[in-house]
Image (tube, coloured by chain):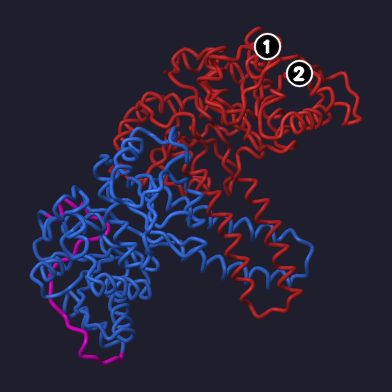
Chain colours: A blue, B red
Amino acid sequence: MKIALDAMGGDYAPRINVEGALLAVQKSGIPVILVGDQPKIQKELRRSHFSTNLIEIIHASENIGMHEKATESLRSKKNTSMGVALELLRDHKVDAVVSPGHTGAFMALSTLVLKRLPGIERPAIAGCIPTLKGSAVMLDLGANVDCKPSQLVQFAVMGSLYAKIVEKHENPKIGLLSNGEEESKGNELTRQVHQILKTKNLNYVGYVESKEIFKGRVDVVVCDGFTGNIFLKTIEGALSTTASLLKQEIGKRPFSKLLVGMFYLLFKDTLHSLGRRFDYAEYGSAPLLGLNGVVHVCHGRSSSKAIKNAILTASKSVETKFLESLKQELETLL
Amino acid sequence: MKIALDAMGGDYAPRINVEGALLAVQKSGIPVILVGDQPKIQKELRRSHFSTNLIEIIHASENIGMHEKATESLRSKKNTSMGVALELLRDHKVDAVVSPGHTGAFMALSTLVLKRLPGIERPAIAGCIPTLKGSAVMLDLGANVDCKPSQLVQFAVMGSLYAKIVEKHENPKIGLLSNGEEESKGNELTRQVHQILKTKNLNYVGYVESKEIFKGRVDVVVCDGFTGNIFLKTIEGALSTTASLLKQEIGKRPFSKLLVGMFYLLFKDTLHSLGRRFDYAEYGSAPLLGLNGVVHVCHGRSSSKAIKNAILTASKSVETKFLESLKQELETLL
């Protein structure tokens, strides 16, 4: 197995990308190909004082900046780190691609280079949401703001298989995100999807409310990318506000300064670690499902640990032969 | 001023409703009319040992149960506590109605009895979301799952005026809930609304991400009821899961049992109080905007304190002559 990393994508490239790749190699022994500006990457590798023959560099002269317009960059730039990495995957030189670069550009370029799987209209970003029972696979988290019912059905099939094969959930329960559990709830889109999912040979359990996701009521949550994105960012906002308000509240308590300080330290660490559990980018497992190849996106502000985790998660997809199973399943289920 | 309370609506009626009314009367001196089953209400009043001439009972023989189908109940029941209360408002016998009963039935019945304001297609549920700077008015929180662009524009006008007049935000900033702040973000619905809002004489500041709401970036958040409901329930779920996970985490720390116990007590109280700040039902301020009358909904599981708060919040709407201002504003702005 070999994994290609877009070494120039993301806010802290190439330094954090190179560090992440080295961490992954040290941890797993899986060879990583760094794609991007060779001199810059080499400079970062020299900084690390860690010598390995598991890291290879493949040069790409251009890079898509985080704030560029995806469509324009794709037209004008022909030799980007992202594009070269995806071509390596298309040509079977590597088994997966990981990129913390521009998500929109990565989506578009992946679709262009790798093509969609038969029966899939649009790829979706899947993420692992922590629950009291472990985690649930949720999709789409932001790739498709407006979805057709057929697309959500495809997300259900892909998410369910990802939960089963990569995340090892046995016979995963699929829920459709809605504003209530009763059949009379939902909006126009979910009501149509609900009717179709009931007829499919899937372990579909019906509507799920957002608060029930955290309790682990289902293993797969299906929603459009607009709603999924609002869900994720609401968690982020609620938790960081809670941390700030907790700090204020604690300041009001009649404890000694020392005790308050200790309390805060404890609160802070724990909340930060919980925050990270909720941040799909931070722990790196956001596969782009529906393409003919294993591709994983990371947040633009990923840490080296997040990059490492993304590489390891992508390797799990490869190892478990997820893509092969998905192709077979799609023929039966769609 | 007089306020009518649906004494039979909600999960704990009539006991909690009567207690809430008494708390409101004691606190504010505003007369409250309890509408519902007279003998049952009288029994609860006798329990309280609090004698006041500010409480009046108006009998209504029927009640809409929390799990009934709204449309069927409205057809078959003609003398419900909800309906009689709304008729009092229509006939100018009271100035506002508060109900912790079946929200769908209350919405439908309010629209039937009071009628919509000119220019308003659908009433919306507004709520106050706590932020680091105070609070923001958000609507719709669940009344309308599928919205037309024109409806969201109407929500913006109503929410903005409510924030200004009742919540005392000076020149309130209006944001449209979206998956990113750039103009290129949003879905089909928000993109259309964005274009219309830009042309209106409103303090519209553009798209707002859900995490930014908590920071107090805007004073009014506009969204469809499906998204608003998911937003609210995500907060609820994230906070209660955080509380549970905190408990687990704390259990792992190498502190003495006593200290852990103290920590947990502190966490628990603070998180519960934060949770309540986020629960629009608990603090009772969820006006139904767009009707020709002041009506406030409460959660079916409201506490007596929540009922009290709902009555006081409704009285603020009456006191500030919000409805009169709204009628004027609608003529100019829509």
In the picture, the quarter occupied by the C terminus of chain B is: top left
| Amino acid type of the residue that numbered disc 2 sits on in the rendered structure | Ile
Q: Nearer the viewer, residue B238 or B81?
A: B81
- Residue position marked by numbered label 1 in the rendering: B88
Q: Earlier in the sequence, mark 1 or mark 2?
A: 2
Q: Residues within 10 Å of mark 2 (few under 14, many from 20)?
A: many
Do the numbered discs 1 and 2 sit on residues whose CB atoms are within 8 Å?
yes
Asked which quadrant contains residue B195, the reply is top left
Place of residue B32 in the rendered image (x, y in percent of width and height, measured from the top left): 77, 21
Q: Magenta region's main secondary structure?
A: loop
Q: Is residue A234 visible?
A: yes
The segment highlighted magenta reads: A49-74
In the depicted structure, whether residue B190 falls above or below residue B318: below
Left or right: B169 in relation to A49:
right
* Residue at 68% from the left image edge and 31% from the top image edge: B310
Name the residue carrying label 2: B33
Does B246 lie within the magenta span?
Answer: no
